Image (cartoon, rainbow, N blue to C red):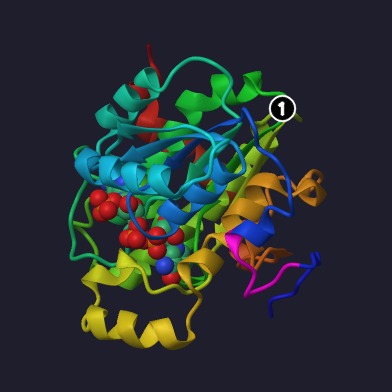
Amino acid sequence: MRTLIFMSKLGKRSTAEEALQGQSLKGKTAIVTGASSGLGIETTRVLALAGANVTLAVRNVEAGEKVKAQLAAALPAGSGQLDVKALDLSDLSSVRTFAAASGDGPLDLLINNAGIMAPPLGVTAQGWESQLGTNHLGHFLLTLLLEKRLKQSPAARVVTLSSDLHRRGKGASVLTTLETDRGFTQRKYAGFAQYGDSKLANVLFVKGLAKRLPANVKAFSVHPGVIPTNLSRSMFGAAVFRAVGRLFMKSVEQGAATTVYAASAPELEGQSGAYLSDCHVETPLHEALDETLVERAWALSQKAVEPYLRS
Ligand SMILES: NC(=O)c1ccc[n+]([C@@H]2O[C@H](COP(=O)([O-])OP(=O)(O)OC[C@H]3O[C@@H](n4cnc5c(N)ncnc54)[C@H](OP(=O)(O)O)[C@@H]3O)[C@@H](O)[C@H]2O)c1
């Protein structure tokens, strides 16, 4: 049974602009992964509207530049600057190159937003099952490489997009992928089960991260709701799903609200490590609170990215 353990005035139908609660992010620096589509575009737009200078970290630079031009044309004077940089989370070398090219000043907001859902079995450049590799390991390495810059900020936040489908994940399966069967050669692959694993890994990561960060850097995981974006591209009948979904699912503006809330809400100061949904703190899957699992997943993830952490 899920319990709401923290209440804000915002809710399921709040938009990302409303989730800002009138705050200014003037002069803050932000990175949004997967800013070329869906929730990443709206998150970028609203952070820039509040004054943040945002780097769109995208695997398709041409698409990123197009989004940047559209957003820049629509944002009012006084909004933050936008820039586009290449980042392929399914290749740890690309993550390293991006982090090195991303600058060296303080970083205030890291939004680990990019993701893929339930594609046919595939592996990343380093041989990891593509969802765990992209959604979790790519962001795990990115965050560790940017940690020094986050610590330089007076008040930084790391927001990682998980999903309510993390409840379908299995801790034991996450550990097996990380430890012994990275490419799913010894087990049956099921797209949504492994999506659940990758999103459980996101929640475990945030729990482990929050324990390790100094007081000036907070970490949150987020379920954005169900929004008809390109995420469903691998699903059977995706176009119909999206068309029907537009009638009753969250809009993209509403879908980006919990991310923006996690990135900016003052009332979350004492809640680092929390899992958020509909602009509230919510209890994740019981397993995600298991300290032994959090630490085991952390150690194995660190081992997986270790060669890319060394200078
Ligand atoms: N939409 C929902 O209902 C829902 C529900 C729960 C959780 N979420 C989570 O919310 C986040 C955003 O999803 P969305 O709905 O906005 O989906 P989306 O429209 O498909 O956007 C996903 C973004 O991630 C990028 N991406 C995918 N693989 C990448 C890689 N290897 N390297 C760098 N970027 C990569 C995509 O780039 P391309 O455009 O180049 O493909 C795209 O920009 C995801 O983490 C997702 O799991 C969404």
What is the span of residues highlighted in magenta in the rendered image?
10-16
In this rendering, the answer to whether 50 lies above or below 16 is: above
Q: Is residue 48 magenta?
A: no
Q: Quadrant of residue 157?
A: top right
**Which quarter of the picture shows residue 242?**
bottom left
* Residue 9 visible in this rendered orientation of the protein: yes
Residue 53 on image: x %, y %: 52, 32
In the rendered image, which residue does mark 1 sit on?
214
Q: Amino acid at mark 1?
A: Pro
Q: Residues within 10 Å of mark 1 (few under 14, many from 20)?
A: few
- Report helix, strand or loop for mark 1: loop
Identify the residue at horizontal 34%, vertical 56% (top origin).
37
In terms of image quarters, where does ligand 1 lie? bottom left
Give residue 236's position: percent from left, percent from top.
21, 81
The image quadrant where one finds the N terminus is: bottom right
Helix, strand or loop: magenta stretch: loop
Whole-percent x and y of residue 249?
48, 81
Q: Is residue 278 left or right of residue 178?
A: right
Answer with left or right where residue 251 lies relative to residue 291.
Answer: left
The foreground one among 227 and 269 is: 227
